[in-house]
Amino acid sequence: MSTSQKLGRPAGPPGVRPSPAAAGRVRAALTLGSVLLGYLVVPMAMSGTSVALPHIAADLGGSGAALQWVVTGYFLAASCLMLVAGSLGDLVGRRRIFTIGAVVYAVSTAGAALAPHVLLLDAARTLSGVGAAGVMAGGGALLASTFEGSARTRAFAMVGTTVGVGLAFGPTLTGWLVSALGWRAMFGAFAGVGVLLVAGTRVMRESAADRRPRFDLPGTAAFVLGVVGLMYGANQVAGAGWTSPVVLAYIGAGLLLLVLFGFLERRTDHPVLDLALLNNGPFLGWLLAALTTAVGTVGVLVYLPTYLQGAAGFSAGDAGTMMLAMTLPVLAVPPLVGRLVNQGVSAKRLIVLAIALIAGGNAWMTVLGPGSGVAELLGPLLLIGVGNGLAAALVDAQAMEHVAADRVGMASGLLNTARGGANALALAVFGAALISLMQSQIGGRELAGRVTAGDLSGGSRPLLIEQYTSAWHTVLWTVATLCAISGVVVHRLLTARVAERAGTGDPDMDPTDPGERG
């Protein structure tokens, strides 16, 4: 095969018009490149922005809930709208949804770079999350409709690697960029990538479902508004406290809307989520594993760089580099896990091990202190990172093994939405818990918010560092305990179902399947 053919370029002398097949290969390659670029920048903007929070606080004066929303708003909008964006892509066209998402992402991220006030920055970042949902959902659908067979398998394998790269190197690259040019340049760079995404849509082929399903508007509205109410209320805890009437009203309204969502989904012929999935024991076990992974990793990933800069004297670049110990295993571990499962190692045992490593890493992280360096933090960060890498390689593939073919798309959407929602909720609660614990020790909620944002200039610095570190230890022990309990529940869900199926002679039970064996 010629070099030009290997690279996807049409072979032949200059001036000869390429064949339709060769043109199709070029279009497919360019589509893949554009989608992969989106899958790189969206996770990078998720994991990397936290490094810039102390600089944003110093420039715009934000703290507490307002500053947390720079990260949480992006997480929330992206996670709760991915399922909706995917459904809309089937109705109006996947390329169109990708294009709209890319435009919204580019414009709103440019607005974030120019924001003169932290509340305007929050709004721009939330809108960026809306665009990110369109890019992620539309991009995946475009790949599924562009490639077939083994080519599709390779394309989605590249997607997984690209997402891992974005998550792994987000804190490091953004840390270097913030240290060199400032936080506005970081958002400007992300906006520039958004412009490239928009340009890439010109070569994409439009596609939509042959049989376009009815869009479950009432169920979708109840779900999105419920999640937003729940998350917004949780985010306000940082500034108002857990007993605030505003907090209770938002959380209560969110829970009521989610109850309404369940009621609506049971009574529609075209649900956005078939609740029967939650009666599937193994699927529920893998779903809980995904939630546990999010809870056990996202708080450390997002808030530890702020502590390292505020209390331990790290620069933004050094803090980002330190986080590589947690993020690099997400790249290195999954290929190894795939080989282990194919060689007969139990997937159930591996996921329980993953949760145990995450719980142990959070417990070990309580060595954190103002004098912490590589020697103290490398071990716990590696434990959490390896656990996260194990889960990333296992959860989706194993969960899909327990879902009927006509529900795979819905199940995938539920996994991604639940994982993203758990990330956003864990972010809000983790930050709010730090502030509440600090307030109980130093007395002022505003000062507590500034300290957790990395600003320790409002009092006796040694005392503030001591109280800040104590709050971190309490939250870390709580997360470790929750993960350990969840690991036991996951093990029981998977084991009980396998035992039940084996005892009843279920023909679907394959004793040679490593995902089924204990």
Image (cartoon, rainbow, N blue to C red):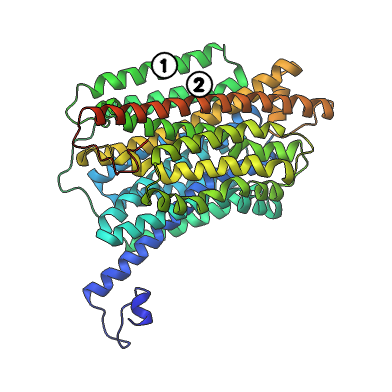
The residue where tag 1 is placed is: 253
Instruction: Decide if residue 343 is on the left or right side of residue 186.
Output: left
Which residue is pictured at 70% across the width and 18% down the height? 439
Whether tag 2 and tag 1 are in contact, CB under 8 A, the answer is: yes
Q: Looking at the picture, tell me which residue is in the foreground, 279 or 248.
A: 279
- Could you classify mark 2 by the number of other residues whose Cα lies within 10 Å: few (under 14), some (14-19), or many (20 or more)? many
Question: Residue at left 49%, top 38%?
Answer: 354
Dividing the picture into quarters, in which one does residue 29 lie? bottom left
Q: Would residue 207 appear left or right of 119 to someone viewing this image?
A: left
Q: What is the residue that sits farthest to the bottom in this orientation?
A: 13
**Residue at (40, 45) in percent of width and height:** 345
**Residue that mark 2 sits on:** 233
Quarter occupied by the C terminus? top left
Instruction: Please give the name of the residue rendered at 61% of the width and 28% of the height, measured from the top-left corner.
Output: 431
Q: Is residue 248 left or right of residue 412?
A: right
Lower position in the chain sequence, tag 2 or tag 1? 2
Q: Amino acid at mark 2?
A: Gly
Relative placement, left or right, of 137 versus 56 is left
In this view, 111 is above or below 177 = above
Q: Dot 1: within a 10 Å radius of its alpha carbon, few (fewer than 14), some, or many (20 or more) residues?
A: some
In which quadrant of the rendered image does the N terminus lie?
Answer: bottom left
Query: For residue 224, which quarter of the picture?
Result: top left
Can you say whether 497 is above or below 245 in the image?
below
Residue found at the very far left of the displayed protein: 211
Residue in the foreground of this view, choosing between 477 and 518: 518
Q: Quadrant of residue 379?
A: top right
- Residue 128: give x, y in percent of width and height: 47, 43
**Pick the front one: 117 or 135:** 135
Q: Position of residue 406 (x, y in %)?
A: 20, 40
